[in-house]
Amino acid sequence: MKTEVKKLDSTKCQLDVEVSGEIVKNKFEEIFAQVAKEAKVPGFRPGKAPRDLLEKHYGARVHEQVLKELVPDIYNQAVEAEKLDVIELPQIADVRLDRSSLSFKATVEVTPEIPLKEYKNRRINYKLAAVSADEVKRHIDSVKESRKAQELNDKFARSLGYPDLAEFEKAVERQIFITKENQERQRIENELLEGITKGLEFKLPEGLVERQAQDMLRQTKIDLAMKGLPRDKIEEQEKLLLENIRPEAAKQVKVYLVLSQIAKKENIAVDDHMPRRVMEFLLKEADWQPAQDEGNPKS
């Protein structure tokens, strides 16, 4: 197999592939053998028709099947041989196949070189979640108003599924605490990602950004439909929706590529769980410091 890689830009390259000899000949023989078992040629039982008649009646079909099976196989071998980090399906062109050789060109998108900045020991200023009595009271008052309750007592708490008012207050406090913890964890992760990706300049693979944008568009259309917006109105807005979505899609692709680069450096498997595993690694390696009280800064 002969392969040649031509770099088109930082995220695209053209892979020229040529293979000849037994690999191609054997694939033709394999497909002809499969066809011969089922071939219906007048005057001959299945599997007994002579080769020249099979060529006449089924040659085009065999040629097509050889392409279907051989091109993906040879393409994958070529990508592996050239150690290309391909991230999108290839565009195959200039395919030439005869009984002894196959050649084609594959345009592929590859992971760009990313100039990673230091990602270990990043400073994290964390705040411990705390719930005040006023926050609990405000939440309970809003529930009371929505229920149009006359007074807050044990009967009111039981109507909500709690044995008494004290238990309901505890439950509200736990709920607010968990919400605050989740918000703080999200803030920490967002700041960590922002710090690692800010200022990193590299070309994003167009196909990957477009695929992410289309996935986000599909979800946005579903959300709008669930809210009751008519289908024709959603379709009218599709172009505008996509324009608004693209910047966020590009941001998400950038974050994903940076995380995948870190994963490779740290021998973390690049699979569906990769982003979460890398985030766990970054959090573990971070420099955790308690946030200073803005009203009483530490010296």
Image (cartoon, grey):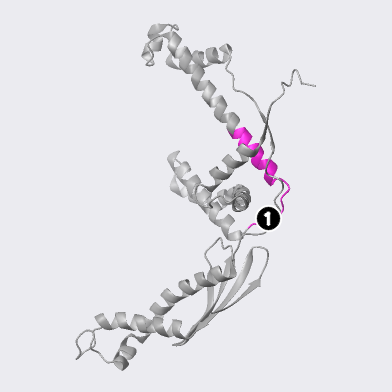
Secondary-structure class at tag 1: loop
Residue 53 in picture, x, y percent from top left? 29, 92
Q: Which residues are magenta?
A: 186-204
Residue under pointer 1: 114
User: Which residue is found at the position 65% from the left and 73% from the top?
Assistant: 6
- Residue at the (35%, 81%) spot, across then down: 30
Residue 134 point in image, percent of width and height: 58, 12
Q: Nearer the viewer, residue 140 or 165?
A: 165
Q: Is residue 247 magenta?
A: no
Q: Is residue 179 above or below residue 254?
A: above
187 within the magenta span: yes
Q: Amino acid at mark 1?
A: Ile
In this rendering, position of residue 296 left or right of residue 8 = right
| Front one among 133 and 120 | 120
Relative to 280, say whether 72 is above or below: below
Q: Residues within 10 Å of mark 1 (few under 14, many from 20)?
A: some
